[in-house]
Image: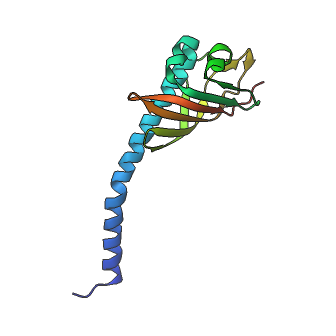
Amino acid sequence: MRLTTAHVAFALALGLATITAPALADDHKMTEEGRAAVSAFVAGVHGGPDAIAPLLAPEYQIMRSNGVGYGRAGYIEHGVGTVKSGPDFALDELVATQEDDVMVVRYMLSVEETIQGKTVAKRAPRLTVFRKIDGQWKVVAHGNFASIE
């Protein structure tokens, strides 16, 4: 049998399909896992210091668009914002990547929030890093790029 360009193209396409199909399933699973972890983090912020504390890794840090940053204790004591919208927030453009026990999630968050009495831009990019500790995703670092009025 003589192989034609069409045969080679078909074989290549078939081979790529079998390689990318599991990868797409993994990407979807990772996106959903990232969405769940970020949603828990936002709900923790809504719940205040007592709700957010168990979600933060010991090495937690935050950096905001205005240059203010905190470590874990400072964030819990002075830096937790107030999410007014409660469970009504939107995550979109979410991309999650994972290597071993570390997951990085970048996304756009739409939420009504104030930080130390100042209004935060309703929709803005965020970057959150998680580490799996005892089977649960804990927040290691958070970049909040929302402008603070």
Q: Residue 51, can we see it? A: yes
Q: Position of residue 127 (x, y in %)?
A: 60, 37
Residue at 37%, 57% (x, y): give it: 20
Quarter where residue 36 is shown: top left
Quarter that holds the C terminus: top right
Q: Residue 81, can we see it? A: no
Q: Nearer the viewer, residue 74 or 82?
A: 74
Residue at 36%, 64% (x, y): give it: 16
Residue 28 sits above or below residue 110 on the image: below
Q: How many marks?
A: 0
Q: Nearer the viewer, residue 121 or 99?
A: 99
Residue farthest along the bottom direction in this orientation = 2
Give the color scheme: rainbow, by chain, secondary structure or one colour.
Answer: rainbow
Asked whether, in this view, residue 121 is left or right of residue 141, the answer is right
Residue at 69%, 34% (x, y): give it: 145
Q: Position of residue 31 (x, y in %)?
A: 45, 40
Quarter that holds the N terminus: bottom left
Asked whether, in this view, residue 16 is left or right of residue 76, the answer is left
Residue 146 sits above or below residue 74 on the image: below
Q: Nearer the viewer, residue 144 or 6?
A: 144
Quarter where residue 3 is shown: bottom left
Asked whether, in this view, residue 121 is left or right of residue 54, the answer is right
Q: Position of residue 6 (x, y in %)?
A: 34, 79
Q: Position of residue 129 (x, y in %)?
A: 55, 35
Q: Nearer the viewer, residue 96 or 6?
A: 96
Residue farthest along the front direction in this orientation = 58
